Image: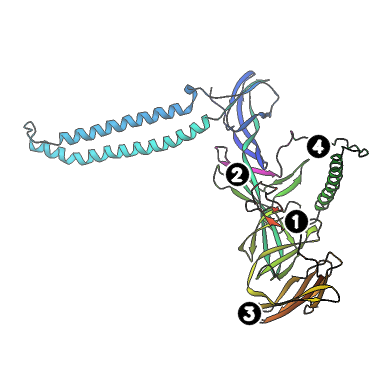
């Protein structure tokens, strides 16, 4: 029984896996019809197969089967290849015979005219035979390609189904199933120009390994994965009791439960804030149509797409957002002698899904990669767009003096630094310079600011900020000095929050030895 061919019309691709919809046409007779429907690949999930007909029919005995060897189309192709190889052997034998018969040594049975005729005909005969061999080899190569494709196809299952029709007719049908060999990844882009608003673009990189090229297919992308088997979290009761001897271990557990409840409440508030709907201005690009499903977002790509199997993936634009921002050149010479161009964006304006790795384009020139994990508890997100090489910054310690005050029974140390900023550009530039003072967390330790060259001060955090208007090629020197005093019988040390670092594999923020996202050692 010859299988009925189908063609892919549309796909709905999850972050992992895809629902594939194929269409076909079949001639039905009144009563029972046994059908073999082709198209599904070896990755198809049989439990998800569905059939839809344009005519009222009844269906039974639905299953996957594989064609027998004698029913495979590849068997006929192999026979053609064998026949052509035999023809080539015959042509090669004829060439050898013509050559042998062209040797007239010790031949007395031929007259000169016959010899002349044979010699004149020999090149034409040999040329024709060689051309036949060349044509046969070309046909074999084409058949071998066809055979290779057929073997891939024949390794795929056929859908066997029994259909009961009410009358003789030509019926159209749709064949739907889930295939695990497809996926897509979001690709975030930041397009910045100091004279323009920032543009955030979300694109998709689509992969499919279904052993079949998808041609002229309607595509939609879903933001999640099928999760019908995921378990709903269950709250267990929490009990309180009076602490007694021998029950010391119960206290940390109760405290942990309370702390976890507070943490969960905070996370829930952050998620709620991050889900605010904001109106964005979409530029004139071929963006996807976005709709919200019950549990995830769907991006319907415009028109149809060609998505080849394997390869490096196919790119598609999803959405673009133009956001107001404030560009700023920032230098933190205490930590880095380089200055950076930054873009400051209101956190509430950011698209909810815009996080993770993002490619940066500065005036449409690729400038590198950033890792964005917006903190919804803060009003602004500052994005570093790359180094401003024309801005040079240095920080030099000029003096450090220590002394003791006998009457006050204390010790003190004075620190003095010089910060130099140079604008190497041929135009005026505004540069924000940041430094800091230590902040006392003990009333016996005092920090006295001696000189900060009119910097803006944050008393609570100890931060100092200068905004400098630098003319072309201008250099500016800033002075910073302060004094720290503490009891002379004590020692002091500098402490601070946990150092924030980023995973070298996925770019997620890391506060310990292992990445919470991918598990890589950091």
Q: Is residue 40 magenta?
A: no
* Label 1 element class: loop
Which residue is at the front of the view, 50 or 188?
Answer: 188
Q: Which one is earlier in the sequence, the residue at label 2 or at label 4?
A: 2
| Residue denoted by label 1 | 374
What distance separates the C-alpha of mark 2 from that of mark 3? 47 Å
Image height check: is 269 above or below 151? below
Q: Tell me the residue at 46%/29% (across/down).
A: 74
The image position of residue 44, as x and y in percent, is 61, 32
| Residue denoted by label 2 | 207
The image position of residue 239, as x and y in percent, is 90, 37
What distance separates the C-alpha of mark 2 from that of mark 4? 33 Å
In the rendered structure, are the residues bearing label 4 and label 1 in contact, judged by CB atoms less than 8 Å apart?
no
Q: Which stretch did the figure color magenta?
A: 207-229
Furthest residue toward top: 31
Location of residue 472 (image quadrant): bottom right
Q: Is residue 219 magenta?
A: yes
What distance separates the C-alpha of mark 3 from that of mark 4? 61 Å
Mark identifier at residue 233: 4
Which residue is at the front of the view, 201 or 489?
Answer: 489
Q: Tell me the residue at 93%/39% (across/down).
A: 242
Q: Which one is earlier in the sequence, the residue at label 1 or at label 2?
A: 2
* Label 2 element class: strand
* Label 4 element class: loop
What distance separates the C-alpha of mark 1 from that of mark 2? 28 Å
Mark 4 surroundings within 10 Å by alpha-carbon count, few (fewer than 14), some (14 through 19), many (20 or more): few
Furthest residue toward right: 242
The image position of residue 198, as x and y in percent, is 71, 63
């Amino acid at each position: 029984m010859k299988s009925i061919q189908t063609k892919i019309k549309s796909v709905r691709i999850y972050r992992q896996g895809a629902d594939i919809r194929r269409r076909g046409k079949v001639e039905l007779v009144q009563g029972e019809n046994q059908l073999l429907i082709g198209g599904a690949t070896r990755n198809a999930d049989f439990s998800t197969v569905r059939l839809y007909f344009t005519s009222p029919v009844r269906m039974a005995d639905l299953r996957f089967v594989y064609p027998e060897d004698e029913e495979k189309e590849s068997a006929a192709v192999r026979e053609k290849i064998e026949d052509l190889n035999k023809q080539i052997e015959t042509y090669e034998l004829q060439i050898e015979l013509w050559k042998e018969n062209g040797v007239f040594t010790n031949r007395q049975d031929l007259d000169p005219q016959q010899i002349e005729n044979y010699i004149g005909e020999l090149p034409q005969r040999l040329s024709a035979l060689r051309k036949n061999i060349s044509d046969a080899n070309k046909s074999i190569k084409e058949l071998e390609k066809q055979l290779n494709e057929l073997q891939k196809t024949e390794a795929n299952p056929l859908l066997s189904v029994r259909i009961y029709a009410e009358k003789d007719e030509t019926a159209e049908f749709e064949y739907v199933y889930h295939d695990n060999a497809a996926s897509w990844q979001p690709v975030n882009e930041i397009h910045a120009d100091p004279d323009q608003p920032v543009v955030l673009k979300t694109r998709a990189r689509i992969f499919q390994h279904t052993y079949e090229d998808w041609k002229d297919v309607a595509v939609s992308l879903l933001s999640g994965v099928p999760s019908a088997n995921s378990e709903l979290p269950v709250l267990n009761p929490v009990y309180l009791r009076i602490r007694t001897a021998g029950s010391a271990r119960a206290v940390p557990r109760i405290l942990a439960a309370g702390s976890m409840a507070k943490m969960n409440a905070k996370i829930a508030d952050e998620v709620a804030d991050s889900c605010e709907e904001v109106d964005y201005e979409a530029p004139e690009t071929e963006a996807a149509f976005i709709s919200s499903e019950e549990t995830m977002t769907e991006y319907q790509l415009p028109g149809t797409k060609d998505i080849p199997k394997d390869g490096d993936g196919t790119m598609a634009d999803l959405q673009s957002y133009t956001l107001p921002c404030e560009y700023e050149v920032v230098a933190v010479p205490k930590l880095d002698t380089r200055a950076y161009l930054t873009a400051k964006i209101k956190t509430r304006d950011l698209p909810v899904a815009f996080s993770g790795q993002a490619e940066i384009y500065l005036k449409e020139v690729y400038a590198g990669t950033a890792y964005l994990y917006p903190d919804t508890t803060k009003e602004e997100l500052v994005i570093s767009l790359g180094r401003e090489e024309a801005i040079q910054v240095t920080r030099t310690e000029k003096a450090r003096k220590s002394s003791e005050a006998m009457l006050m029974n204390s010790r003190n140390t004075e620190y003095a630094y010089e910060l130099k900023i140079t604008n190497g550009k041929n135009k005026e530039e505004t540069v924000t310079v940041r430094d800091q003072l230590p902040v006392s967390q003990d009333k016996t330790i005092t920090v006295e600011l001696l000189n900060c060259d009119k910097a803006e001060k944050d008393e609570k955090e100890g931060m100092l900020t200068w905004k400098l208007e630098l003319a072309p090629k201008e250099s500016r020197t800033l002075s910073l000095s302060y004094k720290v005093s503490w009891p002379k019988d004590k020692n002091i040390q500098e402490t601070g929050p946990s150092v924030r670092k980023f995973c070298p594999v996925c770019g997620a923020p890391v506060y310990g030895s292992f990445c919470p996202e991918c598990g890589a050692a950091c």
